[in-house]
Image: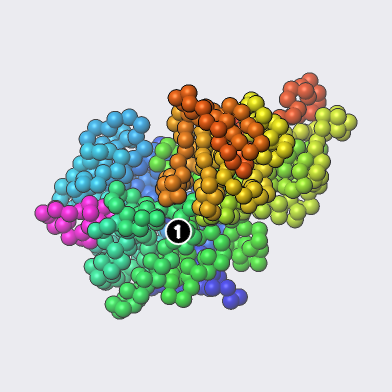
Amino acid sequence: MNDPLLQPFETRHLTFKNRIVHAPTTMNMSDGRGYATDKTVGVYEALAAGGYSAVCVGATCVRWDGLINERMLGMYDDTYIISHREMVEVIQHNEALAGLQLFYGGLIPGLGATFPLEPGKGWIPDTVSWGPTGKYPLGNKQPGVLSTEDYRQLVEDYAQAARRSREAGYDYVSFHFCHGSLPHATLSLLENSGRNDEYSDRFLFCEQILERTQELCGKEFPIIPRLVCDENFLDGADIDYFVENYAPRLHALGIDALDCTFGSMLAGKSRNPEVSSGEYTGGGFYVPNLITLPSVRKLREGLKANGIDMPLMGSCNVNTPEQMREMIGEGAADFYATCRQSMDDPDFPRKIAEGREEEIRKSTRTGASLMTGNIFAKGIAGSPQNPAFGRDREYRLKPAMPPKRVMIAGGGSGGMEYAIIAHQRGHDVTLFEASDQLGGAMAWAGNYGTLPNMEQIAYQPDWHKLMVAKLGINVRLGEELTLAALQEAQPDVLVVATGAKPALPEVRGLAETIESGFARTIDRVLLVGPDSLPEGPVVVWGAGEGIELALDLARAGRQVRLLDPAEKFAPAPYIGSRVGALMRWSAEVELAPETGVTLDEVLPGKVSVIHGDGRKEEIACAALVIAPGRTAYDPFGRSLLGTEIDVQVIGDARKPRSYGNAIHEAAYLSRRI
């Protein structure tokens, strides 16, 4: 097989069966003392079964006071060895190399606090927030400063944890020398400036950790550290600095490969005004795909020019097999290290190997934090698209006993997820969709012409539709499931997945102008595309939902007014971390939400509004777009109470939230019938 992703590769001491590695990911799934749980083991079992050449268990803390979240794996003493052995076993049983990444927080434990912190303390009891100087705090505004002896003790803590990793059976050990951790802060030209002890040599801490690890584990024990190779800060270390100052010393230690990352969590000024340094570490929704590929190539060139032959892992914002192949292409990385795509579809390497790329549940790059928090805010790692992630063992499909007749009203994310799982379990499923296509809001929510990466939103409904078709599920398009039809058919289960409708305000003339086409809901505009709006000025009312549309129109050269009834602009929850880029781009096109504006009357060709100060204004425009928020739509209500039909309401039909909530509810309930 000639696919470059599937080619084996050898380092000094390891043989990788292909070029896809699961990157170390903080799962936050241990017990309260950092021991592995059945949930943790299940996650890594599912990943290894997916076909990766190596699975690296995510950041495991070497000492309690460096924790950054309360369910982080630990390797604090020898009692933790047995806790890791089952993870090693399930990874290796699935023919993958087992790696373990070792971590210590440094400044990061100050993040996530919802209460005032004492100087130098983290938010978790008995944790500390400190760095080489404390000039660039994270979370705790008054971090502590490590002494020389603190550093020396941590060298031993790291190395002893590495020794335990080898005893647990891991094939290699990684070190988290990146993304704001203490080693990274020590490497930083910004944070580590002005020390007068031996650790003013910024690389010494990392070097001593690796040397002491080799003393305890032997030089033949493979090491694949994860380092930041470019801080992407003004006055910070860049690739040239890394190649000249850090790479030769790193290479001299005989590491097996370098897991290279770019960017930092520190509060420096980013070198790239369009992409913050922090977005190079994990990648936001709008961040360009393959954002780090040019950096990987430059690093490779620099290493080669200096006579350093070092295998490289590349990562960040890689969503499709084509992009994965670019990451390991000519002059780039040797491996692709994946995190988010692993969670959204742990089986994707196997699907590539089996010629089933179209079945990959490609990442929409939207956050599970809409449901579960995130690893810095008292949450667990998760996927909005893949509800089985983290529940891999308990969510294994079991045949229905006995099979039931299931009717589903609504073919959006929740309805299709329910249909797929129920069908796979053996139930007799019929899916009704009133419109002429499946997908619901997700099918058109990304229909913008000038905003980057919006096409990725459709990855999820496209996957759902593909699997519904492949499984041969009975779908009735253009047919609305009615109460009369239900009463006649008498199914065992009714799933109400009818979604939400716009929460239209009561405004004079609005209903008539919606009927005439002058006023349109944002749903209607996106369904057919913003280009469908007539030429001329456009008013968008409802900035929380409408800011992306207003910005898209403005960037396309349209004249736009963005109005909102609230006193203060508040983006819709699903926009989340995208709001920073939206506000920056809006300023570039001189688009600003005008708040405290209520609709008074809508007439053909003009809109009458009342500003917060009582001032009335008539605005002439070619179209009015209403983005008023959403209200749950359940056409059946309580009408089936007292019947033998089991009614389950999911997704926005229950309460408007995110598509991830709909998928997770469907996945849970469909496994219980």
Q: Residue at x 37, y 60 (%)?
A: 261
Left or right of 52, for residue 61: left
Q: Position of residue 489 (x, y in %)?
A: 87, 33
Of 481 and 17, the residue lying toward us: 481
Left or right of 89, for residue 219: left
Q: Quadrant of residue 428?
A: top right
In this view, the residue farthest toward the top is 642
Left or right of 641, for residue 587: left
Residue 198 on the magenta span: yes
Q: Is residue 555 above or below residue 494?
A: below
Q: Position of residue 38 (x, y in %)?
A: 51, 43
Few, some or many residues within 10 Å of mark 1 (<14, 14–19, 20+): many
In this figure, which residue is indicated by the disc labeled 1? 316
Q: Which residues are magenta?
A: 184-205
Q: Is residue 513 above or below residue 277?
A: above
Find numbered disc 1 in the image and state the secondary structure of the residue it sits on: loop
Q: Position of residue 406 (x, y in %)?
A: 78, 38
